[in-house]
Amino acid sequence: MPLIQSFHEVRFPTGIGLGSSGGPERRTEIVTLGSGFEQRNARWQNSRRRYEAGYGVKNLDELYAVISFFEERRGALFGFRYKDHLDWKSCAPMQVPTNLDQPIGTGDGVTDKFTLSKTYGTGSTTYARVVSKPVSGSLLLAVDGVASLVGTDYAIDYATGEIIFQPGSIPANGATITAGYLFDVPVRFASDQLSINLAAFEAGDIPSIPLVEIKT
């Protein structure tokens, strides 16, 4: 049977992911000058997240669930969704999303498509991260602080994070579009091999299940 999708819209077992570790990674080139000063250059424009999901495996049944999930994804071949329990909302982890959380664009009276994003920091040094995998049914949207209705004012593609406004609801020139949502991180297995020593696992050794963020 041919396999044509590069990404599977399924989530890594959430209970296992809760015990994982990991976070954002950047690549900075650092050159130390003879004077002792440094020159630093960002090799990557965007951060990339890596996770170690093995820490969340508590028993053999959960380990078997990971093996099954790994085989379905054909190892590192197909991407999938991953819930980062530290960063999975448009707001802080302990807060409830609202339609005013994140600015995602400014209307010009013509543009009808916008992509979800999340901004980190304040002022001139903020970093805007594209959010391509919002959780289905979680999006809250507003234009100039007034709630917009899905299906009436706009449509959302939960596989890409793209918002499309209906002809009669295109944001006016200067209007601020804001959004609140839950989201997953698109990842893949970082290796084509799961190497598990059951004897060591029973003794308390944690298997390694590395995941790496991908662009979709």
Image: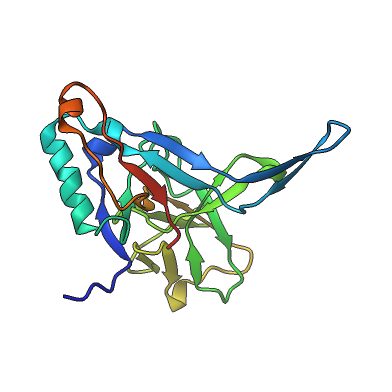
From where the camera sits, is residue 168 visible? yes
From where the camera sits, is residue 86 visible? no
Quadrant of the snapshot with the N terminus: bottom left
Q: Where does residue 141 sit, x and y in percent of width and height?
A: 43, 56
Q: Where does residue 207 sit, x and y in percent of width and height?
A: 26, 34
Q: Residue lying at the far left in this picture: please name it.
A: 61
Image colouring: rainbow
Q: Residue at x 50, y 48 (%)?
A: 48
Q: Residue at x 24, y 59 (%)?
A: 74
Is residue 20 depicted above or below 126 in this figure? above
Q: Where does residue 32 sit, x and y in percent of width and height?
A: 78, 37
Instruction: Kindly indicate the quadrant of the structure image that contains residue 195.
Output: top left
Left or right side of 10 for 129? right
Is residue 107 depicted above or below 123 in this figure? below
Quadrant of the snapshot with the C terminus: bottom left
Number of marks in the rendered image: 0
- In depth, the one of 211 and 87 nearer the eye is 211
Q: Residue at x 30, y 41 (%)?
A: 209
- In depth, the one of 164 and 150 nearer the eye is 164
Instruction: Kindly indicate the quadrant of the structure image that contains residue 89.
Output: top left
- In depth, the one of 68 and 163 nearer the eye is 68
Q: Where does residue 62 sit, x and y in percent of width and height?
A: 15, 37
Q: Residue lying at the far right in this picture: please name it.
A: 35
